[in-house]
Image (cartoon, rainbow, N blue to C red):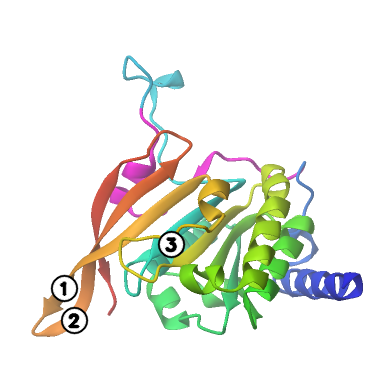
Amino acid sequence: MEAERVQRLASAVATIQARWGERALVSAREAPRESGLPSGIAALDAILQAPAPEGGRRRGGAAPAGGFPRGHLCELIGSGTAGHLLVAAHVLARAQRQRLHTVYIDVGDQVDVDALARCGVYLDALAILRATDLPQGLGMTSDLLRAGFGGVVVFDRVHDVATLGNAEHLAFLQQALRDWAPLLGRSSTTLLVLTEAALPGQYAEGLPLPFAADLRLLFERQRWLLRRRQVVGYVTRVRVIKSRSGAMGNQTDLELAIL
């Protein structure tokens, strides 16, 4: 088991360094610690912004843009075409514009590269690590964090009911979350975990992600957008169901294009 972990780590490190050079992996002491990474979607960033302190002014007089926290895990929950993948793609694109490294953990070979590209992701600058199952994907993520990766990682994805029904996979997830907490706390990585809910607007009880995540967003598709009888997008409602920054309860409707 240890030999397999070392080999997996070496492979992950080689992939990252081959794409971005040896300085892609740095120690936590060297990594920048910005407070948050905006998605670039104004309405979404607005609801992720922490409320101003009493009196309405923040230190320095300016209100920082909302976004996804660095050094923490964020869970994006949706069922089917709900927008959680597209928002993650927008975060990747925004990170690339800020010259941050980006990694996509593809569990089950289901990544939609066309959707990523439509959201502005530069595919040549995105490292996609393919995992055959959930435990392997969790292991790849752990290895990246241990190696000192600093940037944005999208983990696609955890299926709530399927994971709860597989004791081995659930145990791997619980252990991974315990391992990630101190590693993320010492890093500048933004880790986005996509959770596929079996039913729209609902979340199966028993998963450990609600306790581990710093930020949790629930996506619910409201209606399709049509142009000349053709579906060109949809409206999704995004609700903050957990936020340690104080944004919990905020919500907004987003129009997302699929063509």
The amino acid sitting under disc 3 is Ala
Q: Secondary structure at mark 1?
A: strand
Residue 102, placed above or below residue 187? below
Q: Are marks 3 and 2 in contact (CB under 8 Å)?
A: no
Residue underneath mark 2: 231
Q: Residue 118 at x, y = what percent?
A: 38, 75
Q: Residue 157 at x, y = what percent?
A: 52, 71
Real-space Cα separation, disc 3 to disc 1, in angstroms:
29 Å
The amino acid sitting under disc 1 is Leu
Q: Secondary structure at mark 3?
A: loop
Q: Residue at x 79, y 69 (%)?
A: 13
Tell me, yes or no, if residue 161 can be seen here: yes
- Residue at the right extreme of this rendering: 3
The amino acid sitting under disc 2 is Val
Residue 23, placed above or below residue 228? above
- Residue at the top extreme of this rendering: 55
Mark 2 closeness class: few <14, some 14–19, many ≥20 residues within 10 Å: few
Residue 60, placed above or below residue 110? above
Q: Residue at x 31, y 19 (%)?
A: 56
Mark 3 closeness class: few <14, some 14–19, many ≥20 residues within 10 Å: few
Residue underneath mark 3: 204
Which of the two discs, 3 and 1, sits closer to the camera? 3
Q: Is residue 235 left or right of residue 106?
A: left
Determine if the magenta segment contains residue 255.
Answer: no
Label placed on residue 225: 1
Tell me, yes or no, if residue 87 can be seen here: no
Q: Name the N-terminal-most of marks 1 and 2.
A: 1
Residue 55, placed above or below residue 137? above
Q: Name the N-terminal-most of marks 3 and 1.
A: 3
Q: Name the N-terminal-most of marks 3 and 2.
A: 3
